[in-house]
Image (tube, rainbow, N blue to C red):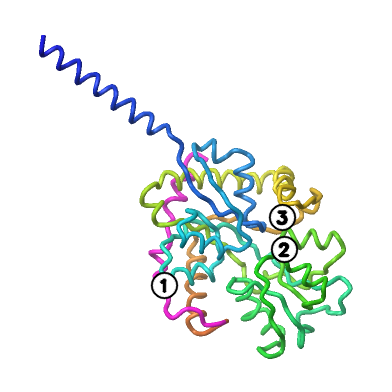
Amino acid sequence: MKRGLALAIVLTLGLVLGMAAAAQAQKPLKVRLGLHTAMMGAPDVMAIRQGYYKQEGLEVEWRRFALGKEGRDAMIAGAIDINATAPTPFLIGLEKGVPYTAVAVNSLFCGSNHVVVLKTSDINSIAQLKGKKIGLPKGTITEYVTLTRILPANGLKPGDYEIANIPDSKDRIPSLVAKAIDAVALGEPLVSIAEHDGLIRPLEDFCKYDPLPFMLTVTNKIIQENPDAVVAYLRGWLRAIKLLKEQPQKAAEVYAEEQKAMGRTVTLAVLDKALRRMRWEPEITPQMEKYLADQAKDLVAGAGEGRLKAIPDLPKALNKELLQKAKVGL
């Protein structure tokens, strides 16, 4: 009798523990996401609005950022787990000891980033910016490429121009219209919107000078403690990229909903044009590794503001395995 009772207790305890484990396994995974308000955030917008993250069993808590480096700083503060940022702030963050890792390439956005002037301006080339005031977001790859490649390639050297720091892209067109600046570096979708409204005229995009990659970064903490959540995120994100590539008009419709949520009413044709200027190539290729290493060398050598004192340990800061796991079955 006692043996039977003991067996019953063991079986009951095993059943309870098994049910608890099952319940735990069924609990949705969670991540806190930095959502970029420029076009680099489009895949996240697609995945959130189309329910891709939820379909992967993932709960996403998100907040918008106008700059990748703002999301990086939120990572430092422990406020978010995943964020996309350009190589310049990514490398600076590594040197400062930010505990994060790049797991994919969010996008290549050189075709969506332009130097623009007012439509009524008599400036028709980059070379004509001598003696002019240029609006740039300080501490970004946009500033870095403009100062170290675009302006020198057009015969301009430090002292030939003045720089105004305008961090938030939504403030750059008003500054241009008010003639507080003569030219500004601007990204999508604001370029296409302002162009459609007859306010600006693009002089040149950045592709001749740099591909402008955006790195998808994840805190080391969540990689170590909840790698399944990162893989679930990447699966939803990859599905969004597939939508952007294979159904661009549908993607434009979804992105229009996001623009409306931010107080912008934009035609589908304008957003479709803007989205098609982006390139979505998620793999961290050997070419991308070389690009990051070369830029780190440039920053150490004193290019731009000479922000790096030493080259970070890049192999430790890159993780290709999580993306490969996420791609299985997609």
User: Which residue in the structure is indicated by mark 1?
Assistant: 312
> Mark 2 near mark 1, Cβ–Cβ under 8 Å?
no
At x 67%, y 89%, the residue is: 157
- In this view, the residue in front, 82 or 327, is 82
The residue sitting at the bottom extreme is 159
Query: Identity of the amino acid at label 2?
Result: Lys
| Residue 41 within the magenta-colored segment of the rendering | no
| Location of residue 159 with respect to 76 vertically, above or below | below
User: Which residue in the structure is indicated by mark 3?
Assistant: 276
Asked which quadrant contains residue 279, the reply is bottom right
- Looking at the picture, how far across and down is residue 120, in whole percent? 89, 73
Mark 2 or 1: the one toward you: 2
Query: Identity of the amino acid at label 3?
Result: Arg
Q: Is residue 288 left or right of residue 132?
A: left
Q: Earlier in the sequence, mark 2 or mark 1?
A: 2
Q: Please state the extent of the stretch shown in magenta in the rendering.
A: 305-330
Mark 2 neighbour class, 10 Å CA radius: few under 14, some 14 to 19, many 20 or more? some
> Mark 2 near mark 3, Cβ–Cβ under 8 Å?
no
Counting labels gives 3
Q: Is residue 98 left or right of residue 168?
A: left
At x 54%, y 35%, the residue is: 55
User: Which residue in the structure is indicated by mark 2?
Assistant: 170
Query: Identity of the amino acid at label 1?
Result: Pro
Alpha-carbon span between mark 2 and mark 1: 33 Å
- In this view, the residue in front, 203 or 169, is 169
Alpha-carbon span between mark 2 and mark 3: 21 Å
Q: Is residue 246 left or right of residue 8?
A: right
The residue sitting at the left extreme is 2
